[in-house]
Amino acid sequence: MRAVLLGPPGAGKGTQAALLAERWGIPTISTGDIFRANIKGQTELGRKAQEYTNAGTLVPDEITNAMVRDRLAQDDVVDGFLLDGYPRNPDQAVELDSMLADLGVELNAAIEITADSEVVIERLLKRAEIEGRADDTEPVIRKRLEVYATSTAPLTAFYAGRGLLVQADGIGEVAEVTERIVGAVEAH
Ligand code: B4P
């Protein structure tokens, strides 16, 4: 399985990526998690990414693409991977194609978790109370949704055009959503 996970912020990508990766026995590559770990560790990459993640805007493509290219070159992804939060715009999608072509592999699916804005805002504000993530404040959540609508949403049509799109409703219990995704991928 080589798949990308799409969906608005708060749709449950991170949550489902962990469960699906375990189910399918493949590693998850979460660009958001990598940025957060680097910000916490105060690395050079973290220093570059922080102003963008805090503002809810995309980290520049040259930084993100290089980071994913390095990660995809590691041994543990040879038999499959689940990319969570990448690609996030059409240029990243084209760059991902080039990385995969260089590795001689192809994507099997682009899994989109759908959820409407009111639900995701509510979920992220709830997470803010628990985790205190810098980008889970209402104005930044609204900015992330705006960036999603303009930059990331066009990827739905991009992958549908290639016959790779698999959609699943992200509303409901976490386990229920996982089964919905697995069922949709199997049907695909
Ligand atoms: P991400 O870490 O990808 O953040 P996100 O899109 O908000 O999704 P996340 O995975 O955190 O939330 P989830 O939907 O799982 O990105 C953060 C930032 O990093 C971006 O704004 C950007 O700056 C940068 N970045 C990342 N990738 C990039 C890229 N490719 N290019 C450029 N910049 C990039 O879950 C949200 C909450 O919902 C959780 O609290 C969860 O517990 C809850 N939840 C999940 N499923 C639920 C369910 N079924 N019911 C109820 N609650 C549920």
Image: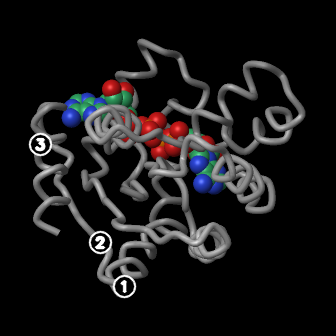
Q: Do the residues labelled 3 and 2 touch (CB within 8 Å)?
A: no
Q: Are marks 2 and 1 in contact (CB under 8 Å)?
A: yes
Q: Circle 1: is it few (<14), some (14-19), or many (20+) Cα within 10 Å?
A: few
Disc 1 from disc 3: Cα separation: 24 Å
Amino acid on which disc 3 is placed: Glu
Q: Is residue 87 above or below residue 138?
A: below
Q: In which quarter of the image is residue 7?
A: bottom left
Disc 2 from disc 1: Cα separation: 8 Å
Q: Where is residue 64 in the image (x, y as percent from the top left)?
A: 72, 53
Badge 2 residue CB within 8 Å of ligand 1: no
Q: Is residue 52 above or below residue 153?
A: above
Which quadrant: the N terminus?
A: bottom left
Q: Circle 2: is it few (<14), some (14-19), or many (20+) Cα within 10 Å?
A: many
Position of residue 158 in the picture relative to residue 114 (left or right): right
**Badge count:** 3
Position of residue 5 in the picture relative to residue 165 (left or right): right
Q: Is mark 3 on a helix, strand or loop?
A: helix
Disc 3 from disc 2: Cα separation: 17 Å
Q: Quadrant of residue 21?
A: top left
Q: Name the mark on residue 162.
A: 1
- Nearer to the camera, 76 or 117: 76
Which quadrant: the C terminus?
A: bottom left
Q: Earlier in the sequence, mark 1 or mark 3?
A: 1
Which residue is pictured at 54% across the width and 51% down the height? 78
Q: Name the mark on residue 100.
A: none
The residue identified by callout 2 is: 165
Q: Position of residue 147 (x, y in %)?
A: 54, 59
Amino acid on which disc 1 is placed: Arg
Badge 1 residue CB within 8 Å of ligand 1: no
Q: Name the mark on residue 179.
A: 3
Which residue is pictured at 66% across the width and 45% down the height? 74
